[in-house]
Image: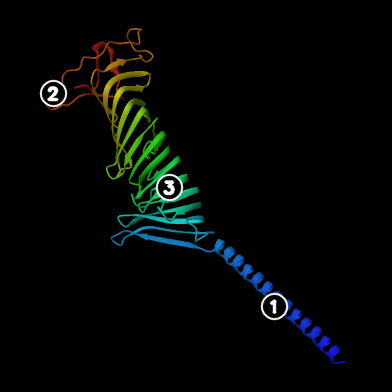
């Protein structure tokens, strides 16, 4: 009888121990499952959190600000959406927006892509499908087609770089600039193979390689063209063209080594050894040939640096001179 009681008690004790072990295992599994769910929730929460970052220079001045959505904020390279950034130069920021972007913590390099727009404080706007911000050098760059809009000027080219304030820029190739003329309503269009250097502070641009400028008066082409812009009147003030210069207007063609074009009144100042081709208008007297020998311009006098002629005046063939020449 005693043996049976001991046996039953032992069986009950073993069963109770097994029951307790099962309960303990259940709670441990449940706790682990809850812990995993918490980690997943936190990870999902990170993907929708806003990311904000500000970098300062050694002098305590802001260098760059960036914020965006859907960021893994703990990653070395942070992926962003709905990006807003500010790149500082002399405490004057350029504001940049883009659909997407990445931020590299180690280099502070910001890469923006899709519908990138950079806007400076003076209203300049640079548009591209991608743009890199280099905070340490206070510059921006892109290898894509970029479009710059400022005042009545619209510029497009492939590959560009410049300072963060969009005041000094360089475009690599496929350059086209259009400057609206409010008086004539006919824009001045300048194209070149590139590169183009642009300095807004000096109101100056240098076009290189296969440069062609057209306006209401005619067409001017050369190897290199320096263009000076009158910001107050929002028009081109002067063009200095050099290397294989060709002037075309109303069927007349003039060749020269260097030409200065004063856009306000259409005056041309020729340099080097000019050569002209003239096509007589209907009813004019003159030889049938379209070619006329080179003009022999006098050496520049102290008061006149170069010989001048006006594109809008007719050529006097029989006198072998051009009206407006001094």
- Taking depth in this image into account, of 102 and 156 the one nearest to the observer is 102
- Spatial CA distance of label 1 from label 3 is 56 Å
Q: Is residue 326 above or below residue 96?
A: above
| Badge 2: residue crowd in 10 Å (few <14, some 14–19, many ≥20) | few
Verify CB contact (< 8 Å) between mark 1 and mark 3. no
Rendered residue at 33%/25% (across/down):
222
Q: Quadrant of residue 27?
A: bottom right
Identify the mark at residue 24; answer none if there is no mark: 1
Q: Horizontally, is 258 left or right of 288 in the view?
A: left
- Spatial CA distance of label 3 from label 2 is 52 Å
Color encoding of the figure? rainbow
Image coords of residue 317 (percent x, y): 28, 13
Image coords of residue 193 (percent x, y): 40, 30
What residue is disc 2 on? 301
Callout in the foreground (3, 2)? 3
User: Image quadrant for the C terminus?
Assistant: top left
Identify the mark at residue 132; answer none if there is no mark: 3
């Amino acid at each position: 009888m005693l043996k049976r009681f001991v046996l039953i008690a032992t069986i009950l004790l073993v069963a109770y121990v097994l029951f307790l072990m099962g309960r303990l295992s259940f709670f441990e599994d449940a706790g682990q499952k809850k812990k995993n769910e918490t980690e997943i929730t936190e990870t999902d929460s990170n993907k929708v959190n806003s990311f904000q970052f500000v970098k300062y220079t050694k002098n305590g001045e802001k260098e760059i600000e960036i914020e965006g959505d859907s960021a893994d904020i703990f990653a070395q390279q942070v992926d962003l959406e709905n990006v807003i950034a500010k790149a500082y130069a002399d405490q004057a920021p350029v504001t940049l927006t883009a659909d997407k972007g990445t931020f590299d913590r180690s280099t502070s390099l910001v890469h923006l892509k899709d519908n990138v727009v950079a806007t400076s404080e003076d209203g300049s706007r640079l548009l591209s499908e991608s743009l890199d911000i280099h905070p340490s050098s206070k510059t921006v760059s892109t290898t894509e087609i970029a479009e710059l809009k400022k005042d009545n000027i619209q510029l497009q080219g492939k590959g560009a770089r410049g300072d963060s304030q969009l005041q000094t820029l360089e475009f690599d190739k496929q350059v086209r600039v259009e400057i609206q003329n409010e008086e004539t309503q006919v824009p001045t269009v300048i194209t070149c193979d590139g590169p183009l250097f642009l300095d807004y502070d000096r109101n100056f641009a240098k076009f290189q390689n296969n440069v062609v400028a057209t306006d209401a008066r005619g067409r001017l082409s050369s190897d290199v063209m320096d263009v000076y812009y009158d910001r107050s009147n929002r028009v081109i003030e002067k063009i200095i063209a050099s290397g294989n210069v060709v002037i075309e207007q109303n069927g007349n063609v003039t060749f020269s080594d260097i030409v200065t074009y004063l856009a306000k009144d259409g005056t041309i100042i020729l340099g080097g050894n000019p050569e002209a081709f003239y096509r007589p208008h209907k009813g004019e007297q003159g030889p049938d040939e379209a070619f006329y020998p080179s003009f022999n311009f006098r050496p520049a006098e102290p008061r006149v640096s170069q010989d001048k002629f006006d594109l809008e005046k007719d050529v006097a063939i029989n006198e072998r001179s051009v009206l407006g020449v001094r």
